[in-house]
Amino acid sequence: MDPLVLLALMGVGMLAGFVDAIAGGGGMITVPALLSAGLPPVSALATNKMQSVVGTTMAVITYWRRGFVVLKDLVPAVVLTFAGSALGAFVVSRIDVTLLNIAVPIALIAIALYFLFAPKLSDADRASRLPFHLFVPVLGFAIGFYDGIFGPGTGAFFTIGFVALFGFGLTRATGNTKALNLISNSAALVIFIPGGHVVWPVALVMALGQIIGGYVGARTGIRYGVRIIRPLVVVVSIAMAVKLLFFP
């Protein structure tokens, strides 16, 4: 591939990593770029998963080092998120998912409206509505399963779950979202890598951009908290809904 194209894709990876570390939705940037660079659809999806996993890992490490993620508390959720995503990837070819093309944009618009108008959204934790250790694994399995089947909006669904069900402040919710989103994305690679679908030169240069973007994005999210996470979640959720409705 042309070195200039690879350089441009590294920049795309950097931008996507920055956005994804704060609000999710980086795939809206990377997948069209990979398709425009000439990758076949399956290779574009596989390469996107590979490079995004690197950026998400950097974001998770950054949130964890700053105390916004307690990894040992997420172990059961990690296991069930991986299982749910793998199961979703397994059954996706056996069910009709066309209904999701309408249902998911509606859900994303609802999430955008919640983040836009909810008066109590802040970085302060509140009382949990459900027992964390019992129900976070359920949340992980359900959204992981969705990610394996369809995918768009996974980060937004995780974030709204941590905020609305478990009372997390928005920055802490974002950090935990990144951790479980990393696992759900990794499950797909169990299929994509042995199948030879990842275009490694592209994945590696984009991963370099993702490392930079993921680190800067996570630091930005931690520094500015709800002031940047809230509007970016709104913008990304609406953008994903518009894309799914009008540019599927």
Image: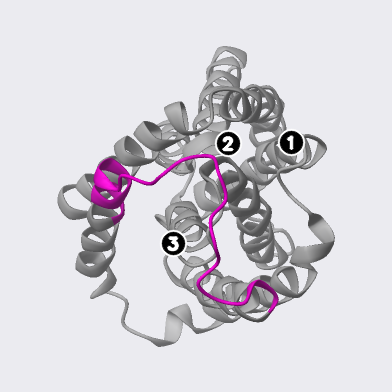
- Element type where label 3 sits in the image: helix
Front residue of 44 and 112? 112
2 or 3: tag closer to the N-terminus: 2
Q: Residues within 10 Å of mark 2 (few under 14, many from 20)?
A: many
For the residues carrying marks 2 and 3, which lies nearer the camera in this image?
Answer: 3
Q: Residues within 10 Å of mark 3 (few under 14, many from 20)?
A: some
Q: Residues within 10 Å of mark 1 (few under 14, many from 20)?
A: many
Tell me which amino acid carries mark 3. Answer: Ala
Q: Residue at x 48, y 67 (%)?
A: 165
Q: Residue furthest bottom?
A: 94
Q: Position of residue 227 (x, y in %)?
A: 43, 27
Q: Residue at x 60, y 56 (%)?
A: 181
Q: Residue at x 24, y 65 (%)?
A: 101
Q: Position of residue 61 (x, y in %)?
A: 78, 39
Q: Looking at the rendering, which quadrant does residue 51 occupy?
A: top right
Tell me which amino acid carries mark 1. Answer: Met
Q: Are marks 2 and 1 in contact (CB under 8 Å)?
A: yes
Quarter in which the N terminus is drawn: top right
For the residues carrying marks 1 and 3, which lies nearer the camera in this image?
Answer: 3
- Residue bounds of the magenta highlight: 111-133
Q: Residue furthest front?
A: 127
State whether residue 194 is above or below residue 232: below
- To which residue does mark 3 refer? 164
Q: Evaluate whether residue 1 shows in this view.
A: no
- To which residue does mark 1 refer? 58
